[in-house]
Amino acid sequence: MSIATSSGRGGAGRRRLVHGVLPGFGLAMGWTVVWLSLIVLFPLVALAVKASGLGFGGFVKLLQDARVQAALELSFGAALIAALVNAVFGVLVAWVLTRYRFPGRALIDAAVDLPFALPTAVAGITLAALFAKTGWIGGLLAPLGIEVAYTRLGVVVALIFVGLPFVVRTVQPLLADLDREVEEAAATLGASRLTTVFRVLLPPLVPSILTGFTLAFARGVGEYGSIVFIAGNMPYLTEIAPLLIVIKLEEFDWVGATGIACVMLAISFSLLLVINLIQAHANRRS
Amino acid sequence: MEIRIRDLAKDFGDFPALFGVDLDIRSGELLALLGPSGSGKTTLLRILAGLEAPTWGRVFFGDEDASATSVRERRVGFVFQHYALFRHMTVADNIAFGLTVRPKAERPSRAEIARRVQELLDLVQLPDLARRYPSQLSGGQRQRVALARALAVEPRVLFLDEPFGALDAQVRKDLRKWLREIHDRTGYTTVFVTHDQDEALELADRVVVLNKGRIEQIGTPDEIYDAPASPFVFDFIGDASRIPVTVEHGGVVVDGRRLALPVEVLGQGAATLYVRPQHWTIGAPDAPGALAATVAGTRRHGVSRRLDTTLGDGRAVEIDVPPETRVAAGDRLSLLPTRWRLFFADGAAAAVAPVRDPGRVAAS
């Protein structure tokens, strides 16, 4: 009785009411802010400060440079195409891995993560060797007039390779959770298999496909290691933006390098923002 | 739609889920498939709907052999235990789904579909929830939406798998009554699966009791409750006390004492006497031709008072008496069943005949 009264009226009791059930908000939030500042915000600010040496006129000039334009176009364009391809085939791979039981399934499941684990340079060299005119795959494609290695197509191929795990791994858990009964319900209501897939099974997956797509795209924009080996790196043609940054750095053009970096950052950030908004909208529906 | 099931069997690997099932479902009736888990009741329902293929046997919808047709072609309504609503669609889109997936030539116009959806929402008493998503509904509301969705395609038969299994007791009761009303109003032939005997007896026109993949008994709720055809049905439905007895010379003998029953039992050998708690008469202690029992305790049980008594061999017997009866723990009584069933060790029910020689019964 006396305990209840003191805790009910005392300062300590009242304070406990203000706190939520989850402990440690202050501490956790503090760490989050400090950590994000150190790891993400601080370098970004440093980048912006460095790039500001260009001045407004310098930025405009940089953007009007045809070589910079071509590199940015290639980096974002190839990343976009690769992410789209991965969105389609990643869902397919995840579908096969979760829906069917077959010998070697665990092996294939493990292989999906390989592009993650492999050093990107190794991937780049391997792909270049495979797709060169004398390589196993390049040799088959050459008679058809398709050249992959040392072309823009090669860039896309490399980005498809490194981006594959993202869509598979984001979609897989949701596919595994899909309720068999929902498909059966669609069938009893007269829906064909195709209608069931497109109107019942895929729509709930859209947010996770978007997440995977975004991750693959972001990875593709920044990818460097695997591309430089297969792209051929010809200015105006197969030179990606990150490579151009490296070249500028090697020429001790620090300001130019950070300028390109800032442009990439701005484009990436606005694209990610748009995708996140779409995703928030899709999530609200289900 | 009349459904006939002939010699149906289903194996899952080596496990026989159903065998030798013969059943006629009458047009317009509300039929319950009742059984414990693993009895094959859901498997039977899924085979009827075409969600599962039988290993053996045939299913006829009217005169048409449905065994060869797919789920889509059967035009049945199926309400799943966990509702299986499409969570990315609104309630209205869920209900309209069966109509919108039809090929263009058979698809009703947009206005017609909207009208039909509203009509069904009114029928399931959720007229204002068309724009909600399933995640915003309670369990009972989801169940109603699932039913409306199944009815939208005007199915030939309606199947419900454990329709109230995941709901609170009060919601269950309300929905039970409501389903009966909907059935009476729409007249659909309806088959539902349940493990809840109260639900089956209260709701259904006829009840099919399943056990280990076989039909134990088919009958009206009265027949099932008052005249169980097998020891299993007696045990599964309602409360009953089991007393091991011996059948000798047409009489039932317990502990060497012959019960004063007004009939003669045909057969011979060890048997089990099944009596429901409300089917006993209580007499003074040591009455001849009756069981001797001692009251171990009493408790309130619905409208009556239930006595826990023990026989001479320690076996427990439950008896329902009017609540005003004055009985206390430790009292000694004599018991005689008014209604009972007797099953021999092989599960066969003992037949009885009127007593030919009343004198002999009294003498024993």
Image (cartoon, grey):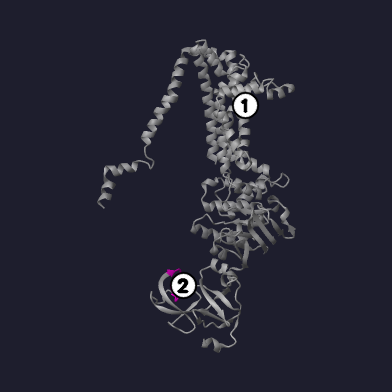
Tell me if mark 1 has few (under 14), some (14-19) or many (20+) residues whose alpha carbon lies within 10 angstroms of its own.
some
Tell me the number on the disc at residue B297: none
* Disc 1 and disc 2 on one polypeptide chain: no
Quadrant hosting residue B248: bottom right
Counting from the top left corner in percent of width and height, residue B53 is at 68, 53
Chain where mark 2 sits: B
The residue that mark 1 highlights is A81
Chain where mark 1 sits: A
Spatial CA span between label 1 and label 2? 79 Å
Looking at numbered disc 1 in the image, what kind of residue is underneath it? Ile
Taking the magenta stretch, the answer to whether it contains residue B46 is no
Out of A143 and A95, give the one closest to the viewer: A143
Counting from the top left corner in percent of width and height, residue B205 is at 61, 66
Q: Residue at x 38, y 36 (%)?
A: A25
Q: Does residue B49 appear anywhere in the picture?
A: yes
Of badges 1 and 2, the one in the foreground is 2
Counting from the top left corner in percent of width and height, residue B26 is at 67, 64
| The C terminus of chain A - image quarter | top right
Q: Residue at x 68, y 24 (%)?
A: A136
Considering every residue shown, the one lying at the far left of the view is A2
Q: Residue at x 66, y 53 (%)?
A: B52
Q: Is residue B229 above or below residue A272?
A: below
Quadrant hosting residue A165: top right
Q: Does residue B2 appear anywhere in the picture?
A: no
Circles 1 and 2: CB distance less than 8 Å?
A: no
Looking at numbered disc 2 in the image, what kind of residue is underneath it? Arg
Quadrant hosting residue B287: bottom left
Which range of residues does the magenta coloring cover?
B300-312
The residue that mark 2 highlights is B315
